[in-house]
Image: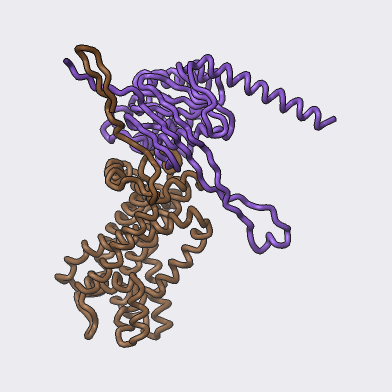
Chain colours: A brown, B purple
Amino acid sequence: MEDSGTTDQKIVYLEPPFIRKATRSGLPPLRNYLLETFRYRTFAFHWSKGELKSRNFDTALGRLWHYLNPFLFGLIYFVFVGILTGGGLNSSKRLAFLVFNLYVWTLLSSMIMTSVSSVRNGGGGVLTNSALPKVVIPIASTVSATNLFLRSLVAYVPLHIVADRGFHIEFLWIPVLIFLTCLFGLGIALMFATLNVYVRDVSRFLPHFLRLWLYVSPAIWEYERVLESGTVNALARLNPTYSGFSAWTMALDGSIAENGPTLAHQVSVFALWAFPIAIVGFLVFVSREDEFAIRN
Amino acid sequence: MSLQLEIKNAVEVKNLSVAYSAVVEQAKSKKSSVLTRSTKIRKIEALSDVSINFPAGQVTGLIGGNGAGKSTLLKTIVGVLKPSVGEVHLWGRPHLLTPGMGFNRTLSGRENVILGGLAAGMTLDEVRSKQEEIIEFADIGHFIDLPTTTYSSGMFGRLAFTVATHVDPEILLVDEALSAGDSSFRKRAVSRIRDLCSSAKAIIVVSHSSALVSDMATEAVWLHRGQVRMQGPVAEVTESYESFTGETTETAQLQSGIDRK
């Protein structure tokens, strides 16, 4: 950088290791950003632990609510859908299908809702006062939601056995589906968290939007129902969660519908949604994160 | 001939401008405000073409009135805000002293020590090695294992301050953070800040109070409406700042007297 010296000593001034400057895109140097995000992984883990502990903190059943909520939710839909469709209330397989899909839905919606609220609340002062990459906060919320989902998988096993859904080789797709679901959920969470900083109404509108999204996703109805219908099928496939939930159902049941897509095909389609959504969500969030300090 | 690697400044701020947009609500008639809110986006230039060097091994005070841009400058150095124009060069990781950062009020004090330490950039091993020292310094007894929702505001402030000041920062930024707890704790807090000052590469202290800045810093920078008004030895800068604020107070008093008449 700069040299000065005496006859027997040469002083070399070191180049600065950190430089902050304006960029045209609003994005920081991404390599450094990702390295810094990795540096705060322990914080993300502990933040997530805290988040889990503080949920249902003041209830008598405490953590049991993490499992009870989707189960009761599933039971309600089981009764509701059973009466509406005239399919009856005597199918344990249908109950298992609904409960499991609602566990997956809870994973998605809780990632989105928790990320939006943590960013809105300033992440315990982290967003307004720290050099910590702000994406750590939604990542921590994803870790919390995934942690709960993994526990609910264990809680779901007895129902799976009672409903006789069977154990299949397709179960090997489950880790891939968990990864893709988390990636997809994180991308959506990052977009909504950013949008909510600009338009506060987003957090009010979000529960209704998520409810509607659930209804148009094959989480509470079987994906096979729309296979025969050309237009409805085409519309259903425009919904990213169609491929996701149909892949989950195929993996859990170990079977595919006649004339329907294969499991590998649905996983690939879901991956084609999840990766771009996660990348776009990340870039949108990171390019706007200094606004969180101003607008929060 | 021997080669010596050195740093001259810990922070160099070069031609820095920081502007941001704020949503401002506009006055509307009662009738029309029932249906919609009228807002306007206003561009605020918080810093304009600021160049300052903060030398290594030195405590620099930043003084100025409200809206001078002191906090914006600190937040840009720490990386919370991005420069609109210009650059900030840093020879070390900056740490803005923020009591309670990363805390989760439903967790116990002990758990918050870990969370706050990690949020401040410490590793888990570093936090664990300092945990007992932090608990002892905060002096909140058996409350340390209770949720912090059960703490009085003074107890919470003490714990938050203690965690924030047990980080070993390379560049320490202090923004009016010395008001935690009762008078005996405040004395210990000031002494703790002094210890930190001796271990950090550089310290930047922000305050409205020129007395506090004179007490801690050797150099000072006076910011006024987003620009550097003066920089140099602390005694000269604080003297000019005080005479300026005295004059502006007198002018304001005179003006209000004329208005009343």
Q: From the viewer's side, name the closer residue of A112 and A88.
A: A112
Q: Quadrant of residue A249?
A: bottom left
Which residue is outermost to the front? A7
Residue at the spot x=30%, y=56% of the render? A146
Residue at the spot x=49%, y=22% of the render? B231
Which residue is outermost to the top? A7
Tell me residue A113's x, y (percent).
42, 57
Q: Quadrant of residue B200?
A: top left
Quadrant showing the N terminus of chain A: top left
Tell me residue B145's x, y (percent).
39, 35
Relative vertical location of residue B260 with respect to residue A283 in this rendering, above or below: above
Q: From the viewer's side, name the closer residue of B106 and B62.
A: B62
Tally of numbered tags: 0
Image check: A41 left or right of B183? left
Q: Quadrant of residue B191?
A: top left
Relative vertical location of residue A187 with respect to residue B214 in this rendering, above or below: below
Tell me residue A112's x, y (percent).
40, 58
- Is residue B13 shown to the viewer in this render? yes
Which residue is outermost to the right? B261
